[in-house]
Image: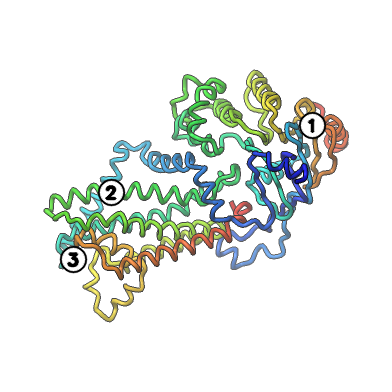
Amino acid sequence: MSSITCKNVSVSYPPRKAPSLKEWALRRNRGAKPFDALRDVSLIVEPGEAFGIIGGNGAGKSTLLRVIAGIIPPTRGEVIARGVLAPIIELGTGFDGELSGRENIFFNGSLLGRSRAFMRHCEDEIIDFSGITEFIDAPLRTYSTGMIARLAFAIATTVEAEIVLLDEVLAVGDAAFRGKCEERIRRFHQTGATILLVSHDLESVRETCERAAWIDHGRIVALGDATEIADAYERGLRPISAPAVANV
Amino acid sequence: MTTAALEAERDERPVHRYFAGQQTRFMQEWREILQSGHLLYNLVHRDLTIRYKRSVLGAMWTLLHPLLLTAILVIVFSHIFRFDIEHYEVYLLAGLLPWTFFAQTTVSSMAATAWNGALMKRVRVPKSIFTLSTAISGLVNLAVSYVPLILIMVMRGVHFRPAMLFLPVSIAILAVFTFGLSLALSTISIYFIDVREMFTVALTALMYLTPIIWPLKIVPPRFQMVIRANPMYYLIEIVRIPLHAGIVPSLTLVSAGVALALTSLLIGWLTFRRLSAGFYPHL
């Protein structure tokens, strides 16, 4: 059976509600229309497959990932995911500056649904991978942005899962660290996990994924072989913003 | 059996199914909370430690705060306004501690749910866990704050009686009531933040309508029904009586407390079930 199934999934947000009594009384938001973030998206990802999702900013890629992760409820349709899920959607969720790096490893891990025993088991591996051995017991507020990003990535990717949902998190740290990250994702793939990769980086979609979908304005506009979809996307994009694409 | 059915039977992978119009089911939420035991522990631990992380006296404040508060109130009410109560400081503290638990838990659960909105946007967590963790931290603080009260009781020569063992039962009733109300309030406050301000004001009024600082007997009999219409009267009374009077509260008081607690829990859960699925755009 499939790993991820999306059946006619739509997500629409209600028009922004009045946040206070005053605005509610004044009815400033009258006549606002709901915003459709996803429209009738259907998708099947097979076990062990690496599937890419590409599209412009605000196309609905991240919304789709969050629906599959069970964070956003679909307005219409249904999502079924079979297997232990590891959503790597945003790094460093719930990081607390007052807690030490080590305490944050456990806190962040528990937010991602991992047990204390598992985190104990992986503690050293995470510290080692992040390269913050020296400062691991100092409060997180004393860390540099790069250190925080490395720690967050190390926690998020130290996981045993059957489905990995990855949201543009590849671009953290320097070139050497990026190499280590790509290595990790390859390892997920080799161990037979299903990977859903949302990325702006067409090159990593071509390299990692077998199939891909192109999403635009909440709709799937093309679905098929990853390289073909990435090529089509690149061609389709070129006339709109030529200089920006030159260094993709 | 068809091949597909056989295959499905052999499939041991957990199934996550999300569909339009899905309501939070009680067992589902409960199971997810049990599975998030590590998170619950961390939330409580963070609540209890971060508060004092940068302060010099640290967790000592949990003890000092009720002591200093009592000192002020005892000075004001034993010397300026006098009530005819034996061991006034015990009466006061035995009622003030559960009230503080109630007030702090309800107010901070609204804040916790709002602050953790950013988390709920990024990871899947059972949404009632923030209210639950706030209530548990409140209970830990309450337990610690009984230490100064017991010290005062020893110093004032209050006799310790077996009825005092009823205290945990009373606190459990109060805790269930507080959790139910907190769940309703924190759910509504996601949609309508003004509830926080409204409730904080109402809380102050409610405190003066509850016999905590003053005894019920100073109220003329014809107005006592006003006080008896206040749910907090029963909930505070059952917690105070075992310590201050040294007796088990009457069956009437206890059953009123239990009825209030269950009603509050039901209202809290129904509010949460109805509204929690639509949190996302409001976080």
Q: For residue B76, what is the image quadrant?
A: bottom left
Left or right, A111 with respect to B136, comes to right
Residue kind at label 2, given as amino acid type: Ser
Residue A58 seen anywhere in this rendered image of the structure: no
Estimate the spatial distance between the alpha carbons at disc 1 and disc 3, rounded to whole Å.
Answer: 76 Å
Bin the neighbour count of mark 1 within 10 Å (Cα to Cα): few under 14, some 14-19, many 20 and up: few
Left or right, B216 with respect to B107, comes to left
Q: For residue A162, what is the image quadrant?
A: top right
Q: Nearer the viewer, mark 2 or mark 1?
A: 2
Q: Which residue is mark 2?
A: B145
- The image position of residue A131, as x and y in percent, is 54, 20
Residue at the spot 83% in from the left edge and 35% down from the top edge: A241
Residue at the spot 17% in from the left edge and 52% down from the top edge: B153
Q: Is there CB contact under 8 Å for labels 2 and 1? A: no
Q: Secondary structure at mark 1?
A: helix
Estimate the spatial distance between the alpha carbons at disc 2 and disc 1, rounded to whole Å.
Answer: 62 Å
Residue kind at label 3, given as amino acid type: Phe
Q: Which residue is mark 1?
A: A244
Q: Which residue is mark 3?
A: B81
Left or right, B203 with respect to A236, comes to left
Viewer-proximal residue among A132 and B247? B247
Image position of A31 with respect to A150: above or below? below
Q: Secondary structure at mark 2?
A: helix
Viewer-proximal residue among B173 and B275? B173
Where residue A87 is drawn, which disc sits there?
Answer: none
Residue at the spot 80% in from the left edge and 33% down from the top edge: A211
- The image position of residue B211, as x and y in percent, is 27, 67
